[in-house]
Amino acid sequence: MDGAVLVAGGTGFVAAYVIARLVKRGVRVRTTVRSPSQAWTVREHVAAAGAEPSEVGVVLGASDADPRTDADWAKALSGCRVLVWAPDPPALPQRASWPADGLDRFAEAARRHGVALIAAAPLWSEPGDPSAGVNLVAYGDVLGPLLGPDRASCLDVMGDVLELRTLGTPRRWLNIVDVRDLADLVAKLLDREAGPAMVVVGSAPVALPEMSRLLRDELGEAAGHASWLSLPDPVVRALARVRPKRWGPVVPELGHRRFIDDSAAIELLGRRLLPVEQTILDTARSFAKQRPRQDRANVPAWTPVSRL
């Protein structure tokens, strides 16, 4: 493939899997970080995802800037043919922090810099139909194995179940997508970079109590404190009146099920999506295996950080 691919925000959970998948495909990849210390985070995450981190170029300074006008972004995109924007979705209580104009900003930046854009955004953000030159993966609820001790907020739902952060498990429904499938879909869209195209991916609705039962049945002690208690909807609503910050965001989700047609995603991948049960169990096992950050001296060699 001619030209490099720039993945914005390489320290992200989703972005790290995307970078690793692209490296495995033989794509020249660079990513943006805010500081040299974050380059080490990218290094560790890409290695944990099974790819060679020395194949990734790192650009400092562009992450916090406006990609439409900032000179650092112009330098970062020099020699690239595709820009990938795949930020981590926030946990349910923090969804208001999602950059509502993020897709539009990066689409405009891609047009200004003469590159194609591949984006990934959660369905609840209502990304809409992509504009010309944009390929979009709209997804449900992301789970997948941790890449290190720093946990992405999108995985808080698993933490809530395993660490008994709640009195019981509310009947909230998830459309689970494995981060490995999501990264694979982004990589596959490189072959459709002309755009526009939108691929939707997510499982049939899975209730949190069902996920909790699966963990208890399959993992034993590794299931942590997965609750036996399923909270009735009226109890959750009552809790929301007492602790609105904790339970208030859950109330609109009660009884809300989304059914997704993932046939286009399966066609693009050329295979079935990873089983939901495997995704749930792999995520939980990775929580159980968390270890202190490894000695950096033992991580494979790294390409020097560049400012381009």
Image: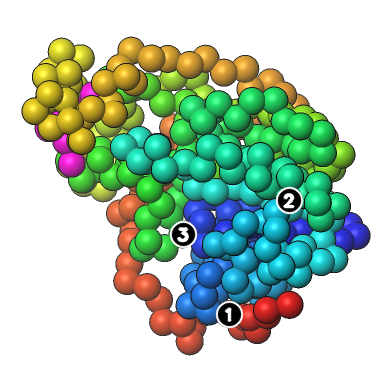
Residue 274 seen from this side: no
Distance in Å between CA atoms under marks 3 and 2? 30 Å
Q: How crowded is mark 3: few (under 14 residues within 10 Å), some or many (20 or more)?
A: many
Q: Which residue is drawn at 81% across and 47% down?
A: 111
Say which label, 2 or 1, has the lower sequence index. Answer: 2
For residue 127, which quarter of the picture?
A: top right
Mark 1: amino acid: Pro
Whole-percent x and y of residue 300?
58, 80
Identify whether 73 is placed above or below 248: below
Say which label, 3 or 1, has the lower sequence index. Answer: 3
Magenta-colored span? 165-170
Identify whether 275 is placed above or below 21: above
Residue beneath label 1, please? Answer: 300
Whole-percent x and y of residue 58?
65, 72
| Residue nearest the viewer, comparing 306 with 150 | 306
For residue 270, which quarter of the picture?
A: top right
Looking at the image, the residue that sits furthest to the bottom is 297
Q: Residues within 10 Å of mark 1 (few under 14, many from 20)?
A: few
Residue beneath label 3, please? Answer: 147
For residue 179, which quarter of the picture?
A: top right
Instruction: Specify whether 166 is left or right of 296.
Output: left
| Residue nearest the viewer, comparing 64 with 135 | 64
